[in-house]
Image: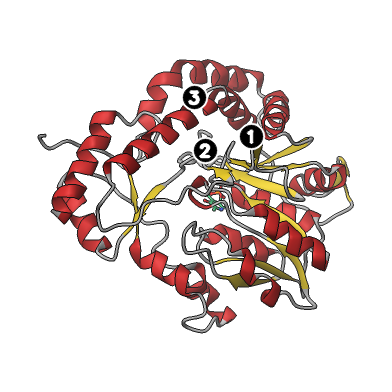
């Protein structure tokens, strides 16, 4: 097979499918001059929550804001501890920090790379208030044992579902098996806005009301600020864009899952670890990441072959300079640290073709051959 260009992500391929419809909807919002919150946001919130099987959706201006408001709505604040993982995007931990609470890390399961529930008991202290698992790469964390520990100790659970739109855990969509779940609509996510966006879904009217108030300056009515709030509102243009794209999400997700199966079938028998397929979950393949101790060489070889790759994530959060003060001792999170040096994300988006996937796999075979 000849050389070929396979980008890591190709948003233009998606635009070719939905561009016209997006343009129509977005221009209608421009003409309406209703730019902040509005009818498109309301409709999107309702529809997205419904697809998650949740009673309420509160749309905000990013996934990070969703995490921040979900934690605040649960009453998390200074002096509290929130248990999470370091094998995640920095926003998970920054959201805990924004509340003035202390992030406490447990390691991840070596197969799934999501929160290891067996480590939770020993991380719980007098100050622990919540657990924040991450559905990394679109694969749901093992929620039942996490919830068991939470129930035993009276803790709240918030899901970071930023990468896991419509993923299911034991047959039910993520987002309904905790106090609140937070999604991101950053353009590169499985469901992406034409800009920034996020949402909190919850079955709790109290949490939804609190989050709604906090995203809009803590107002109960205009200029009556009961809580110290934020400007975290979603734009109506993003509500319109998301409303269009949401119609295609299950089709796009099925395509990603099919691509992942093709990669995994083609990559059997090589000295690398393929993404886990735990029987409790149906992931949505936001990222298709393989693991190998030869990661850096393999990445260079793929780059030379015209293939875009990514590393999610090269430096675990507890090793980032900005969280140095948390003073997590070296060797405390060995699975997380090994993953950071071994993970390599291959091209993954709905419009990827079988020919492109086969080319990527052929180049990987050639590297190890
Ligand atoms: C993208 C992401 C976030 C943050 O979402 P933004 O919309 O970029 O603010 C949080 N957590 C994880 C795991 C993410 O991938």
Residue 318 horizontal side relative to residue 266, left or right: right
Q: State the image quarter where residue 27 is shown.
A: top right
Q: How many marks?
A: 3
Task: Point out which mark residue 195 bears.
Answer: 2
Task: Point out which mark residue 353 bears.
Answer: none
Q: Is residue 168 above or below residue 240?
A: below
Mark 3 nearby-residue class (10 Å; few <14, some 14–19, many ≥20): few
Camera-near label (1 vs 3) is: 3
Q: Position of residue 196 (x, y in %)?
A: 55, 41
Q: Is residue 319 above or below residue 224?
A: below
Q: Are marks 2 and 1 in contact (CB under 8 Å)?
A: yes
Q: State the image quarter where residue 133 is shown.
A: bottom right
Q: Which residue is mark 1?
A: 235
Residue sitting nearer the eye, 18 or 281 = 281
On the rendered image, what quadrant is the N terminus found in?
top left
User: Of marks 2 and 1, which one's residue comes earlier in the chain?
Assistant: 2
């Amino acid at each position: 097979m000849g050389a070929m260009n396979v980008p890591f992500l190709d948003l233009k391929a998606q635009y070719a499918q939905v561009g016209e419809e997006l343009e129509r909807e977005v221009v209608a919002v421009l003409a309406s001059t209703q730019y902040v919150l509005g009818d498109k946001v309301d409709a999107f919130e309702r529809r997205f929550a419904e697809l998650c099987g949740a009673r309420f959706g509160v749309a905000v201006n990013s996934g990070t804001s969703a995490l921040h408001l979900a934690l605040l709505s649960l009453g998390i604040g200074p002096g509290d501890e929130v248990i999470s993982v370091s094998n995640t995007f920095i926003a998970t931990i920054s959201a805990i920090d924004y509340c003035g609470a202390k992030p406490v890390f447990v390691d991840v399961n070596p197969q799934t790379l999501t929160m290891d529930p067996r480590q939770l008991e020993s991380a719980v202290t007098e100050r622990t208030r919540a657990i924040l698992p991450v559905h990394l790469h679109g694969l749901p964390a093992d929620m039942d044992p996490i919830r068991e520990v939470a129930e035993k100790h009276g803790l709240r659970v918030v899901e970071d579902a930023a990468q896991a739109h419509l993923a299911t855990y034991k047959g039910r969509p993520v987002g309904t098996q905790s106090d609140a779940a937070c999604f991101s609509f950053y353009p590169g996510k499985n469901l992406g806005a034409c800009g920034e966006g996020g949402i909190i879904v919850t079955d709790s009217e109290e949490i939804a009301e609190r989050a709604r108030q906090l995203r809009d300056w803590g107002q109960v009515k205009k200029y009556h600020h009961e809580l110290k709030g934020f400007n975290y509102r979603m734009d109506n243009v993003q509500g319109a864009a998301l409303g269009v794209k949401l119609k295609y999400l299950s089709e796009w997700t099925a395509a990603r899952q099919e691509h992942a199966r093709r990669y995994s079938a083609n990559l059997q028998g090589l000295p690398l670890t393929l993404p886990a397929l735990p029987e409790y979950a149906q992931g949505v393949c936001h990222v298709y990441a393989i693991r190998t101790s030869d990661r850096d060489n393999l990445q260079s070889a793929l780059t030379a072959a015209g293939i875009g790759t990514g590393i999610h994530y090269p430096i675990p959060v507890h090793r980032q300079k900005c969280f140095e003060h948390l003073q997590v001792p070296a060797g405390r999170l060995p699975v997380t640290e090994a993953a950071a040096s071994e993970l390599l994300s291959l091209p993954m988006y709905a419009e990827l073709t079988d020919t492109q996937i086969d080319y990527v796999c052929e180049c990987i075979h050639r590297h190890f051959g």
